[in-house]
Image (cartoon, rainbow, N blue to C red):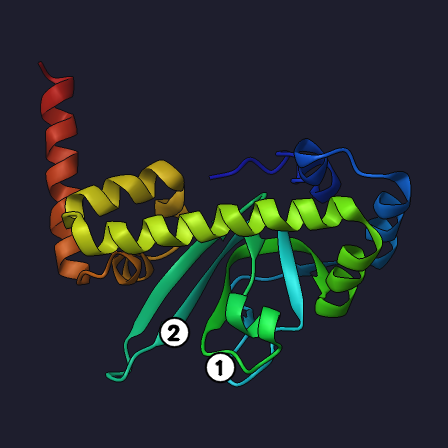
Amino acid sequence: MPHINDPEADLLEILGFIIPLPTPMQNRVKEESLIETFERKKILLSPGEIARRIYFIRSGFMRAYFIDEDGKECTTWFRGKGDLMISVTSFFTQQPAQEYIEVLQDSKVQSLTWLELNAYYADFKEANLIGRILIQKYYILSAESAILLRTQRPEHRYDMLLQNHPEIEQQTTQQNIASYLGISRETLSRIRRKKAKMCHQTQNR
């Protein structure tokens, strides 16, 4: 699990890696962005609500999920420190959401409203470049995730999840992990047992 003294992710620092930010834009972000802390199990968004804010995770861990026709939770995203968490369709169209956003570990976030974000696009050319690059990044991640879940064996899906989120076993439940992988909790347990057995055999050689 993350150490208590681990530094928080810094929004301006991460944006500055993409392109140097002009001082007026840095000052606006500092003044306008809202910094909040949320406890585990907090629901930041529910179906029918409009996503008014885009969240930058300074520390913590979250997921997005929806409930299918059978009443089963289906996790679509896991996001951690340094990531953006957003209900994409609801935020950018300002229409009611169809998904939940849930805090899985106590989290500290920095957020901007839809109006604030669009004002940055209008006032700073750098904001447009940053927005384009970030949208490309998360669109690619979404496409890769969709292909992975449809073409790869459950064992490989699990390995890729651990590669992207090495601490996920401590950050959320086995049920949430199984729902993201599109498998039953029993299947996940078998995969974990098989993986543990293989690791044990390798260590004893």
User: Residue 98's spot in the image, x, y percent?
Assistant: 45, 79
Residue at the image point whose x is 32% and y is 69% from the top: 74
Give the residue displayed 75% in from the left and 44% down from the top.
126
Dot 2 surroundings within 10 Å: few (below 14), some, or many (20 or more)?
some
| In this view, 145 is above or below 116 | above
Lateral position of residue 120 relative to residue 8, left or right: right
Q: Secondary structure at mark 2?
A: strand
Image x and y of residue 193, in percent:
13, 43
Q: Quick check: can you spot residue 87? A: no
Residue 54, by quadrant, is: bottom right
Q: Give the structural element (helix, strand or loop) at label 1.
A: loop
Q: Is residue 55 left or right of residue 186?
A: right
Disc 1 and disc 2: Cα gap in Å? 8 Å
Three-letter amino acid code at the position of disc 1: Pro
Quadrant showing the C terminus: top left
Of residues 104 and 179, the one drawn nearer to the viewer in this rendering:
179
Q: Earlier in the sequence, mark 1 or mark 2?
A: 1
> Do the numbered discs 1 and 2 sit on residues whose CB atoms are within 8 Å?
yes
Q: Nearer the viewer, residue 4 or 155?
A: 155
Which quarter of the figure has residue 178?
bottom left
The amino acid type, in three-letter code, at marker 2 is: Phe
Quarter of image, res 17: top right
Q: Position of residue 175 (x, y in %)?
A: 28, 62
Question: Which percent across, then down, holds residue 186?
Answer: 13, 59
Disc number placed over residue 47 in the picture, else none: 1
Name the residue carrying label 2: 66
